[in-house]
Structure formats: structure tokens, C-alpha cells
Amino acid sequence: MTAERTLPVNLVQDLRGLLGDSAVLDAAETSTRAAGLWRSDTLQAAALARPASTGELSRVLRYCHDNDVSVVTQGGLTGLVHGADAGPDQLIVSLERMRQIEAVNPQQRTATVEAGVILQTLQDAVDAHDLMFPLDLGARGSATLGGNAATNAGGNRVIRYGMMRDMVLGLEAVLADGTVVSSLNHLLKNNAGYDLKQLFIGSEGTLGVITRLVLRLREKPLTHNMAFVACPGFDQLSQFLRHMDRGLGAPCRPSR
Ligand SMILES: Cc1cc2nc3c(=O)[nH]c(=O)nc-3n(C[C@H](O)[C@H](O)[C@H](O)COP(=O)(O)OP(=O)(O)OC[C@H]3O[C@@H](n4cnc5c(N)ncnc54)[C@H](O)[C@@H]3O)c2cc1C
């Protein structure tokens, strides 16, 4: 049996005091928003907070921790398993005001981003440097990089480039009590100590809110070819994939 929570009477005013008036929606304003892509219902929550920085988010979570307010994190709301659904007695934290691409480093082939950046925005930004961020999925125009990390997204290039877990070099997150955990590593080869970021990747917001990411970029391929291939069985399919992997170069091959 779960203990009943009593929300602070001045929840919305308190949060507005921390973030500013326009950064917090009350329950009525929240309920005007769609609950997700392809959904006809609307968001339910006591309030929706839109912090603009890690510091602001930390203050919100510390307040929630001290006042026993349950929090649900939302990115682009494209998840298909209702992981970002909230209830009327919960606070939604949306990353929609944390959408800055802080840096693209073509030499190191890394991008440093805030977690609310939309996947396609990053794909387009790095394309200008002849680089690519290989994660790709149908929801690219709405899904956030924080959401991609929280769900350990796979996408349609997973066989060649791996999952989101394979593309994150560093990560910053805020724990439920407001503590900021920073592990913003930029190096591909880093065997120093525990790899804390891996705990947060795939944790769907249960361990903390992901706020910033350092992502590994790849060289944009010079050519693309498409073929429609029909395999008579699973054995032939796996043989075919091995043949393609051998013939087209392994994903970690140094770029030209
Ligand atoms: C057309 C379509 C195609 C898709 N294709 C794929 C696919 O090929 N592969 C695949 O893996 N998924 C796919 N998805 C599912 C979805 O797009 C991914 O799960 C995506 O990674 C979710 O990102 P989001 O920003 O929308 O997260 P949301 O839906 O907002 O949230 C998803 C979960 O992550 C948590 N979360 C969100 N942001 C953060 C954060 N900053 N910190 C901590 N927790 C957070 C939420 O609490 C929730 O539990 C597809 C969805 C659609 C609609």
C-alpha cells in the first residue's frame, strides 16, 4: 500500500518563485497540452515546470524532495510505452527550455548538448561539419536527446552504429534531492573509474533527470546506396549481415 501524498498548498506559487511565472504551468494550463504524439488525451498533473538550466532544475528537485512531491520527467513525449505519463498529484518537469547545442567539436568529433535538444536539430547541425550523429528514428523531429538517452533508443541504424548507449561519451544529471552528478567526459578512450553515465542511460528517469550530454559523432558517409534484399531464412540473413559488415567496413574504422 502506498502512503497518500499531500501536495504543498502553494505548489505553483513556490515553483514560480524559483523559476519565474512563465516557466510554470498550473494544472488547468497543463491540461491544454496533448499527452503525446498520436494521442487524443491531454496531460494530467498538478503543475508543469520548465527549468532553463541545470541549476534551476536542481532547485526544483530539491524543493520537491523536501516537500514530498513526486516528479515525472518529459522530453518530446514520443515514447510509446507511457513512461512519461503523470497523474494529477504529480509534477511534470519538461526539458523544453533546455535546447541549446553548446558545442560541436569537429576535431574531436563530439557534440555537447542540453538534454532538451531535438534529435533532428542535432543531426542537421552536425551535417554542416560533414559529420553525422548516427541515431535515427521516425520520431526524430520531436524526440529529445535526453529522452533518447533515458530510453537507450535504438533506431534504424542500430546494427551498424549501436544504441544510444554507444554514442554517449559524457553525461550530467540531477538526482531527486537536487544533487548534480557531472560526468561530462569527452574522450573515447577513458577507463578511469566507474562509468556512471551508463547507470542513467536506459533508466527512464528513475535515477535522475539527464540535463546535458557529450555525444560521439561519426564521419558522414560519402555515399549512400539502398537495396531491397529478400533472404530465404534467418541463417541467410545473418550471413548477409556479416558479409555486409566485412565488405563495407566495421563501424569503428578510422575515418578517411
Ligand atoms: C514514429 C516513432 C518511431 C520510433 N522509433 C523508435 C526506434 O526506432 N527506436 C526506439 O528506441 N524508439 C523509437 N520510438 C520511441 C521514442 O521515440 C523513443 O523512446 C525516444 O527515445 C523518446 O524520446 P522523448 O524525448 O520523446 O522521451 P519521452 O517520451 O518524453 O520520455 C520517455 C521516457 O524517458 C524519460 N525521460 C525523458 N527525458 C528525460 C531526461 N532528460 N532525463 C531523464 N528521463 C527522461 C521519461 O520520463 C520517460 O520515461 C519511436 C517513436 C515514434 C513515435
Image: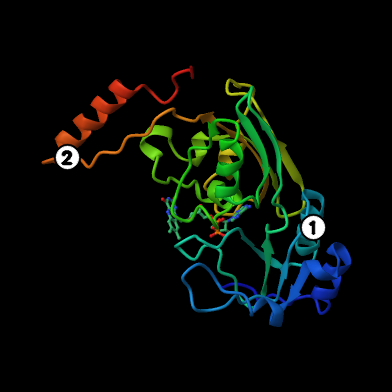
Q: Nearer the viewer, residue 190 or 38?
A: 38
Q: Is residue 17 above or below residue 231?
A: below
In three-dimensional space, the C-alpha distance between marks 1 and 2, rounded to whole angstroms, equals 52 Å
Q: Is residue 57 above or below residue 218?
A: below
Residue 99 appears at what percent x and percent y?
69, 51
**Secondary structure under the numbered disc 1 in the rendered image:** helix
Q: To which residue does mark 1 refer?
A: 62
Q: Amino acid at mark 2?
A: Phe
Q: Amino acid at mark 1?
A: Arg
Left or right: where 205 falls relative to 139: right
Q: Nearer the viewer, residue 93 or 90?
A: 93
Give the label, 1 or 2, closer to the camera. Answer: 2
> Which residue extends farthest right?
17
Left or right: where 195 falls relative to 219: right
**Secondary structure under the numbered disc 2 in the rendered image:** helix
Q: Is residue 233 above or below residue 245?
A: below
Kindly indicate the quadrant of the structure image that contains residue 19: bottom right
> Which residue extends farthest left?
232
Which residue is located at x 81 percent, y 62 percent? 63
| Dot 1 alpha-carbon crowd within 10 angstroms: few under 14, some 14 to 19, many 20 or more | some
Which residue is located at x 49 percent, y 19 percent? 255
Q: To which residue does mark 2 refer?
A: 234
| Dot 2 alpha-carbon crowd within 10 angstroms: few under 14, some 14 to 19, many 20 or more | few
Which residue is located at x 43 percent, y 45 percent? 154
Residue 13: mark in rendering: none
Mark found first going from the N terminus, 1 or 2: 1
Kindly indicate the quadrant of the structure image that contains residue 231: top left
Left or right: where 180 falls relative to 220: right
Residue 160 appears at what percent x and percent y?
38, 33
Which residue is located at x 51 percent, y 51 percent? 151
Residue 52 appears at what percent x and percent y?
78, 55
Residue 248 appears at what percent x and percent y?
33, 24
